[in-house]
Amino acid sequence: MNLVVEPPLANAVIVIVEDQLMSARLLELILRQAGFSRVSILTDARELADRCGQLQPDLLLLDLHLPSGNGLDVLAEVRAGRFGCRPAVIVLTADGAPDTERRARQGGAADFLTKPYDRHEIVARVCQVLKIRVLERQRAGSPESPSASDDRADVQMEAVRRLGQVAEYRDDATGLHIVRMSEMSAYLALAMGMSAAEADVVRRASPLHDIGKITIPDRVLLKAGELQPEELALIRNHTTAGARILAGSRSPVMQTAAAIALTHHERWDGNGYPNGLRGEDIPLVSRICAVCDVFDVLTTPRPHRPAWSVEEALAEIVAQRGRYFDPTVVDRFHDVLPQILEIRQRVTDDAAAPLPRGS
């Protein structure tokens, strides 16, 4: 099978940081044959600052074992932005030990490739990482997306988020949960193999997952004590209520939002609600959103409990792998946890002030 890359991915700037020239040339050849046109080689990592300044790469393919320095140290400098840019990084190594991969991913590597290379795997992994890069640039309004289209998309996204906040403000004073959850869900969707366009639909649709909460009386939604059976039924009805609110639209975003609203409380083992769906009968978008939703809820302080630590929340999600959550989604979430935490921190730091409650 020949993998052929098309714009905008084909126009990505890729720098191979590898001291073994023959190995680097092989990588370059594989990428150029796949359609990448802007690939260059750097055999000395000490020149990386100058090269990053000149090229502003989208992606580094970084060998861990460099004569001029430890690849993990270089990775840390790249992720800290010390070279004047913050490209995504795929780590290259002949050491396939799990601990090596773990340290690379914890250091911020987007992916990890073990030598000897499989050409199809290389191209597929590079494309996957670059899809995430394209989505991030679209969110930032980069020149890669036409400005008029971006403006319209931004307005639509703001409207969706604020509609979601109508429900969210009732039990989350900041409303930031839906922003964090939607950004995490889009990233995880890419990690699960969705296209950039599909992940963007997830990002736009997921803020409405709890829109059905507007039908729940405050006395039930905000109750601190144990819920009575009839109150629990009202809580659970927010899934079907949300789906009804969003039903009937011809918009792919709203259709996806309706599916998420209906099924984000279904469980992998079939014991969820409202319809007791099991396994892959649950839409993938809902399986993705469920993990991100629970992770952010657990790690966010609430009036009735303190925030869980990241380690505690991750342990709980892993414990529910195959019960509440799709095992594959949990595994991919674990793989990209450093990037998920970056998203969480960025949204917390950079979010705009919330709407006044009286607006």
Image (cartoon, rainbow, N blue to C red):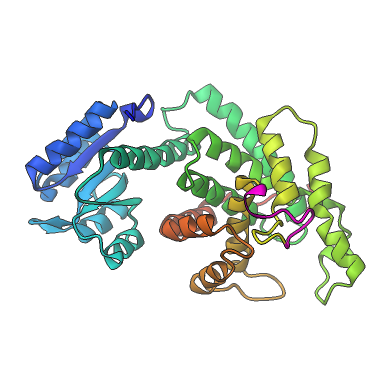
Q: Is residue 91 left or right of residue 305?
A: left
Residue 241 sits above or below residue 252 on the image = below
* Percent of width and height locating residue 22: 8, 41
Q: Is residue 229 magenta?
A: no
Residue sitting at 67 percent across and 48 percent down? 281
Q: Magenta residues, as a range?
A: 271-282
For this view, does 128 lie left or right of residue 328? left
**Magenta part mainly helix, strand or loop?**
loop
Q: Quadrant of residue 136?
A: top left
Residue at position x 35%, y 39% from top?
A: 124
Q: Nearer the viewer, residue 118 or 57?
A: 118
- Residue at the front extreme of this rendering: 1
The quarter holding residue 268 reads bottom right
Residue 79 seen in the figure: yes
- The residue shown at (27%, 33%) is 13
- The reply, left or right, for residue 66 in relation to residue 60 is left
Task: Report if residue 272 lies within the magenta region.
Answer: yes
Q: How many marks?
A: 0
Residue nearest the viewer, comparing 351 with 182: 182
Q: Looking at the image, which is closer to me, 255 or 308?
A: 255
Quadrant for residue 117, please give it.
Answer: top left
Q: Is residue 214 left or right of residue 173?
A: right
Q: Quadrant of the N terminus?
A: top left
Q: Position of residue 198 (x, y in %)?
A: 55, 36
**Relative vertical location of residue 71 with respect to residue 25 in this rendering, above or below:** below
